[in-house]
Amino acid sequence: MDRVVQAVSLLVDRQGRVAAVCPQEATVGGLPAARVLGQPASRLFEPASGEKVAGLLAAPDGGLVPALLATSAEGGPAQSVWVRARPVLTSAPELPVVELLIGTGPREWLLERTPLGLWCADPTEGVNQRDDSAALLYGVPGARQLTIAEFLARVHPDDVPDLLSLQLDATEQPGRTVQAHFRFQGDDGGWRWLLTWACSFTVMGRPLLVGVSAALDGGPVDGRSDEGARIARRVRRPAEELLLAPSQERVADLLLERFPALIGATQATVGLLDGDRGRRLRIERRPEPPAGHGAPWVVPLDAALPLAVVARTGRPSFLTRDEYLALAPDGGTLVAEPRTRSWSILPLTEPGGTPLGAWALGHEGPDGLAPTAVAAVREVARLAGQALARTGRTQPYLDLADAFQAGAAPLPPDAVDGLTVTVRHLPAQHDLGLGGDWYDLIDLRDGTVMVCVGDVQGHGAHAAPLMARLRTLVRAYSLGSPDPGTVLGLVNDFLDRFPVSATATCTLLRLDPRTGSTLVARAAHPPLLVVGPDGAVRTENVTGGLPLGVLPGQGYPTEPVDLPPGALLALCTDGLVEGPALPLEQGLAALGAVLSAWPGDSLEPLADRLLPLAGATGHQDDATVLLLARQS
């Protein structure tokens, strides 16, 4: 016999009575869990076996014995099982507070591959995973013990309130079984989807929370399970994408595109509350309906359609195709594909139960989801509801950020006759795509251009608004003055009137591509480098002034720099060449060494080699480099 038929875990108190049954829907000897609770554990067995079990409960280290499990009249003759007892407390193993595992299957399975993990939580000792089964479930070595804080740090933040509520409920009602499901991150960085049952005891004068955990599908952790276990394994890793989804649109895409294929659904439909104070459902469907199909894609929430009913009530619905058509003769918003013969319609709700919408899956079989798969799919719907609630609250800010990013993000420089220009820009906060660095190339309409590279103090979201203002100021003043130093002085004085403190470094130059004549002004910015046609690199350490915004009334002198045909000019910010681990002189030397190898043709391969230099600075900062070559 190579697969488990049944495994039931009992928590037994110091008087030998059953305090909890896991799974809660399990039967013990044909009796439901509710009728087993409070009964002496030894009386669940035939008399001779009951004596063996009583001995196990009294043994300090527990043990494993074969036994005959008594059954009710409806259950037939006594069932041959293995029984294992394990003490809960490592510090006081003589106390008969134990886990009693009853399972049919090979002895080795009970010893080594039990799919239920015993744990206990003690305010003093922390959370102790008691056996190898728990180690497999939690992804934490069996001998390790975590403090309460360490344990909760591994629980997904959205699920911490559920566990704290479980602890509170169990403590306030000793002996009552409480339940929660949550995500737990193991040592390998992967998330486990777990169900746990627990009871509270008072042991040695202090409260002790004792529990049993199981995988989400309730099957063995070695993967030998039914369709429910296979689906649970398929969706477990992709479900992490829901935790990172940046928008409700992304959540809907996952429910429509990713999960149906993993679950084996023939089609999927998502209805989300939209507009009019949440009294309408906005509908999306995959595959798309046939051309010319007239089903409504916005329906009232109070409609009689099953999708709306589930969204409104928060209660799932499992219907055959005929049952669905009886409720919506025209197909409503679902419109069955030819292969679809049944439906599973699941609510999408906030953690508190507030409706957000519904998710419908079509199935090829007439019976819909396998019963063992329902838990896994409902868990996906629960996580999707959490993600929808989270992204719904942040969506207005995301829309604002998108609008700001569109106006503030650096743009590729415009083409200028006689010049080849390329830029590489790496913000410190990659996810935002914004930072404090900026660059610009401004056509002055007289045959010359202004070239600018600047750096606002700070980086990321805080620096980006100031960067956008400064870039606009430099551009505006450049169009009115031909002198880079004058422009920097005007910008500096304007910053003194900013409503918030802002400082920045900047290099600004005016270049005539026809002659190579260049005027440069610098506000405490790193020097620029010039690579001659012969490959020689020189540092143009132009006399500069204070950073912009430090003191009003500052002057910024300009100095000429010659750029012969075929020469290359490099402007960068300090994030590329300076940091705690890299003095500016060494950073400029490293930059010059890369530039000296330029073969004189395309700038793109050269630019690709420059940003990695930022890794030597010893910190994470915005990094920008602008390369400008005068054509021969």
Image: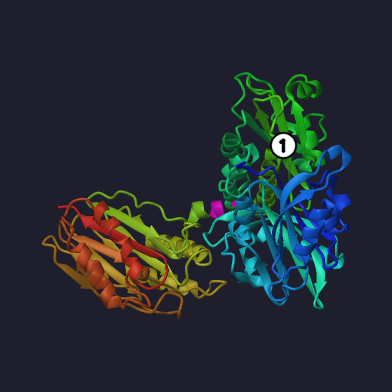
- Dominant SS of magenta comes to helix
* Percent of width and height locating residue 538: 18, 70
Quadrant hosting residue 51: bottom right
Position above or below: 161 against 356? below
Q: Quadrant of the N terminus?
A: top right
Q: Which residue is mark 1?
A: 371
Which residue sits at x=13%, y=63%?
A: 535
Nearer to me, 58 or 88? 58
Query: In what element is the residue under mark 1?
Result: helix
Position above or below: 140 against 293? below
Position above or below: 250 against 572? above
* Percent of width and height locating residue 570: 26, 63
In the image: residue 593, left or right of residue 239: left
Nearer to me, 108 or 173? 108
How is the rendered protein coloured? rainbow
In the image: residue 543, left or right of residue 596: right
Nearer to me, 564 or 357? 357
Nearer to me, 229 or 583? 229
Quadrant hosting residue 365: top right
* Percent of width and height locating residue 461: 53, 63
Which residue sits at x=47%, y=67%?
A: 459
Task: Identify the amino acid type marked 1.
Answer: Pro
Q: Which residues are the magenta region?
A: 397-404
Which residue sits at x=40%, y=60%?
A: 426
